[in-house]
Image (tube, grey):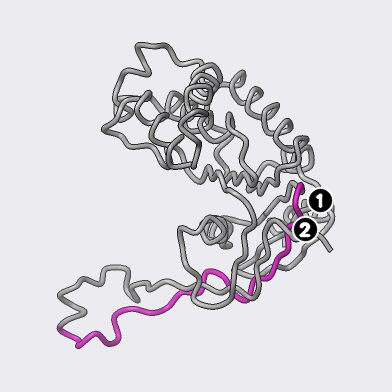
Amino acid sequence: MQTPAIHINEVSFSFKASKTGTASLREWIQRGGKGVFQHKKVLDQVSLTIPKGCCYGILGKNGSGKSTLLRIISGIIIPDEGTVQVNGKIAPILSLGAGLEPELTGYDNIRLLCILMGLHPREIPDAIQVIIDFCELSDEKLRMQVKRYSTGMMARLSFSIAIALHPDILIIDEVLSVGDIGFQEKCYKRILQIKNSGSTIVFVSHSLVDVQHICDKASVLEKGKIIYDGDVKESCDIYTRQFTT
């Protein structure tokens, strides 16, 4: 039996939320640490197995736990319960500009992230050129600090760094709607190339057209629980019914 790319077993996660929405540290101290915060469960006993080479979609309303699940898979968040096994190098695109250092230039961010992604020093020059070519930002813009970038420029750079390389697992969280139409289409084509090369993709999107076009399987999250896992079209139908019932 082939080892899966990702195996999630009964994962749960909660965070502390103010009961009133305005609790302060002073109030917490005054009450002796009691009665101010409550635990809000974001994920509840989630189990998933994603095969290697699969493009897997995750659907659900805002607040259903999709982004939290991706952050747990990426190792950014540690679950309260359960286990996550990831087999391969991950390239996550979790939010606009994620992983970019605003005080550094575009060039410096590219070099830094190539190093952090584990590229051998001999591989870095070629990787840098691939990223520069893909993002289509001018030399002048790449010499600018990232904090001076427009939303579109930041999208181009962050997408290009993750997509232009060859990750074992690519994680995308509802960010491909940013940027101009031409660059979006370029990203989609690259995603399909990555998929066809045998990499695993985990794709969160509210665009059912994109999910059905890209994904092999999909699941639906509702209030932190997986309510369906399987066929892409059926997942999309269930997701649509969430807004009509």
Residue 40 location (% of width, % of height):
46, 74
Q: Residue at x 73, y 43 (%)?
A: 211
The residue indicated by pointer 1 is: 232
Q: Quadrant of the C terminus?
A: bottom right
Q: Earlier in the sequence, mark 1 or mark 2?
A: 1
- Give the magenta-colored segment's residue range: 30-53
Which secondary structure lies at badge 1?
Answer: helix
Extreme front residue here?
Answer: 122
Q: Does residue 208 show up magenta in the picture? A: no
Q: Quadrant of residue 23?
A: bottom left
The kind of residue on which mark 2 rests is: Ile
Which secondary structure lies at badge 2?
Answer: helix
Marks 1/2: CA distance? 10 Å
The kind of residue on which mark 1 rests is: Val
Q: Quadrant of the N terminus?
A: bottom right
Q: Residue at x 37, y 72 (%)?
A: 17
Left or right placement of residue 221 versus residue 43 in this view: right
Q: Residue at x 15, y 75 (%)?
A: 26
- Position of 182 relative to 235 (above/below): above
Name the mark nearer the viewer: 1 or 2. 1
The residue indicated by pointer 2 is: 238
- Position of 36 relative to 130 (above/below): below
- Position of 147 relative to 80 (above/below): above
Residue 133 location (% of width, % of height):
54, 16
Residue 122 location (% of width, % of height):
49, 28
Q: Does residue 49 show up magenta in the picture? A: yes
